[in-house]
Image (cartoon, rainbow, N blue to C red):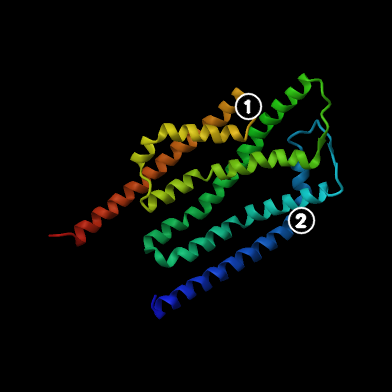
């Protein structure tokens, strides 16, 4: 490796280090803000199951939930800044049109995270909790829930769904760098459906109705991803055709 390449590598690593530091700083600031809003968020999340009383089985339960809620709040709020820093790092290697197009991924990814969280909280979690409560009642057991267990159950549903709802963003990006295309997505549609249904089942109770309610949006999410891939792929073909007309053999 030449000295010039060594210098470029050092510059890239320095740039990456600087952006990681800024991401950490913003994450810490958002987490401080998270501690301020943690209590109203916790009170709001408890309303998803208003008929039960939560108990603390450990002196650290309340502290643990405060920290977890503050951290998740910080991750969500700082996500646009984190994505922007990633975009800014790879920006020099992109063409001007690619820079503009990829920047649009930042608000779209943030929006899909919010949609995933809302879908998990307002649809999946109530169904999952109702299913478990029904089983508990059928066994004539007294529902006594710990604060930590309640929120762990909730977060184990919300966070995976927020990640799964990034599928359209990932598909658009992989189509942009020519790893995926609409034809391939259609070809593997059945396998994709199966994987999404399995993923949806993992974050829901083994109930056919709940699994179906979750599976349908997952499948629609995949079809939405295919449509976005078509749009990106079509623009790529138009750009390639324009390039060939201008610079191809005459």
Residue lying at 81% horizontally and 32% vertically, measured from the top left: 52
Residue at the far left in the pictured view: 250
Query: Which residue is label 2 attached to?
Result: 35
Q: Badge 1: how crowded within 10 Å, few (<14), some, or many (20+)?
A: few
Image marks 1 and 2: residues in contact by CB distance under 8 Å: no
Q: Nearer the viewer, residue 5 or 197?
A: 5
Give the vertical position of 176 relative to 153 (above or below): below
Horizontal and vertical percent for residue 35? 76, 56
Q: Nearer the viewer, residue 6 or 134?
A: 6
Horizontal and vertical percent for residue 13? 51, 71
* Mark 1 secondary-structure assignment: loop
Residue lying at 45% horizontally and 35% vertically, measured from the top left: 192
- What numbered label is drawn on residue 206? 1
Q: Going by the image, does 40 lie left or right of 181?
A: right
* Mark 2 secondary-structure assignment: helix
Residue at the far front in the pictured view: 1
Give the vertical position of 216 relative to 3 (above or below): above
User: CA separation, marks 1 and 2?
Assistant: 35 Å
Q: Say which quarter of the image contains residue 21.
A: bottom right
Horizontal and vertical percent for residue 163? 57, 45
Q: Nearer the viewer, residue 43 or 178?
A: 178
Mark toward the start of the polypeptide (1 vs 2):
2
Residue lying at 66% horizontally and 38% vertically, measured from the top left: 121
Of discs 1 and 2, which sits in the foreground?
A: 1
Horizontal and vertical percent for residue 211? 58, 28
Q: Say which quarter of the image contains residue 154.
A: top right
């Amino acid at each position: 490796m030449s000295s010039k390449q060594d210098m470029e590598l050092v510059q890239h690593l320095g740039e990456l280090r600087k952006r990681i530091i800024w991401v950490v700083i913003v994450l810490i600031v958002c987490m401080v803000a998270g501690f301020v809003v943690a209590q109203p968020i916790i009170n709001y999340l408890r309303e998803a199951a208003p008929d039960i009383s939560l108990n603390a089985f450990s002196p650290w339960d309340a502290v643990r939930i405060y920290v977890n809620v503050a951290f998740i709040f910080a991750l969500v709020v700082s996500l646009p800044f984190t994505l922007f820093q990633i975009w800014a790092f790879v920006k020099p290697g992109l063409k001007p049109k690619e820079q503009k197009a990829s920047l649009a991924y930042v608000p779209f990814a943030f929006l899909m995270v919010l949609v995933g969280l809302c879908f998990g909280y307002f649809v999946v979690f109530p169904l999952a909790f109702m299913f478990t409560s029904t089983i508990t009642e059928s066994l004539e057991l007294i529902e006594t829930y710990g604060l930590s267990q309640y929120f762990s159950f909730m977060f184990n549903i919300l966070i995976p769904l927020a990640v799964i709802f990034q599928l359209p963003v990932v598909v658009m990006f992989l189509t942009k760098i020519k790893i995926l295309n609409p034809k391939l997505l259609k070809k593997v549609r059945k396998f994709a459906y199966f994987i999404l249904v399995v993923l949806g089942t993992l974050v829901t109770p083994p109930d056919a109705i709940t699994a179906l309610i979750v599976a349908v949006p997952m499948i629609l999410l995949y079809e939405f991803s295919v449509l976005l891939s078509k749009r990106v792929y079509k623009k790529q073909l138009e750009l390639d055709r324009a390039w060939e007309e201008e610079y191809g053999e005459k």
